[in-house]
Image: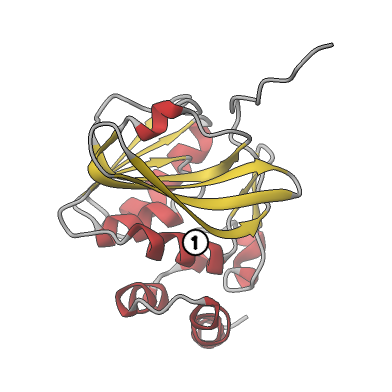
Amino acid sequence: MLEMNLDAARHNMVESQIRTWSVLDERVLALVARAPRQDFVSPAHRNLAFVDMPLPLGHGQVMMAPLVEARLVQALAIKPTDKILEIGTGSGFVTWLLAHLGARVHSVEIFADLSAAAQRKLAAHNIANAVLEVGDAAAGWERHKPYDVIFVTGSLPTLPDSFKTCLAPGGRLVAIVGQSPAMEAKLIRRLDAHAFAETSLFETDLPALVNAKQPERFVF
């Protein structure tokens, strides 16, 4: 696909997929409309960068479909002063989006090769406000807390409280919770030191974070 056709595909993605799926925040739409998503997918999938489907990253992980990324970013209502935690760097594309909306992004990836590849791609696009770390953040990442925003890019069978307690008062978290094929995208807001509000956004399906905590099962 020629680069000009990629531009047309990006435009069609925004107008035909994302805008029509309740993504109406003009700041998010404008960002996605200029995002170089084709540079973050694998070379073999470059022509599919703007298609409404998840794309493989290796290690059994996938890049979210574009409309899921956009809908979750919109739900977070990111401010220019926000400190952001991303669980699962993956391709680095969501990191790119978050870095353009907030002040600083701390992104954690369990697979060192994915983190290194994402770092190269982000550097090629002059992203200077994202710090990538390698580690297991399936139960949270307290190293730089509190965070104003947390974006979990893989699903969780159950959401550990440790994610919520990493939020600053007024902070927002998005995560996809449940087990395939019935998972729910949720927005969690921290109201104060002890109170949280939860909103269901939509249903979807996504591979789980490596080492994600499994729900307790009763044994008879």
Q: Residue at x 31, y 37 (%)?
A: 195
Task: Name the spot of residue 52 as percent of width and height, x first.
Answer: 64, 71
User: Residue visible at 27% across and 55% down?
Assistant: 127
Residue 143, quarter of the rendered image: top left
Task: Locate residue 215, reporting x and y percent.
Answer: 65, 26
Relative placement, left or right, of 115 versus 192 is right
Pointer 1 residue: 69
According to the image, what is the colour scheme of the structure? secondary structure
Residue 140 visible, this angle: no
Which residue is located at x 28 percent, y 55 percent? 99
Secondary structure beneath disc 1? helix
Apparent side of residue 73 relative to residue 13 in the rendered image (left or right): left
Q: Is residue 173 left or right of residue 202?
A: left
Give the side of residue 178 with respect to residue 72, left or right: right
Choose between 56 and 180: the one closer to the eye: 180
In the rendered image, the quadrant that contains the C terminus is top right
Q: Disc 1 marks which amino acid?
A: Glu
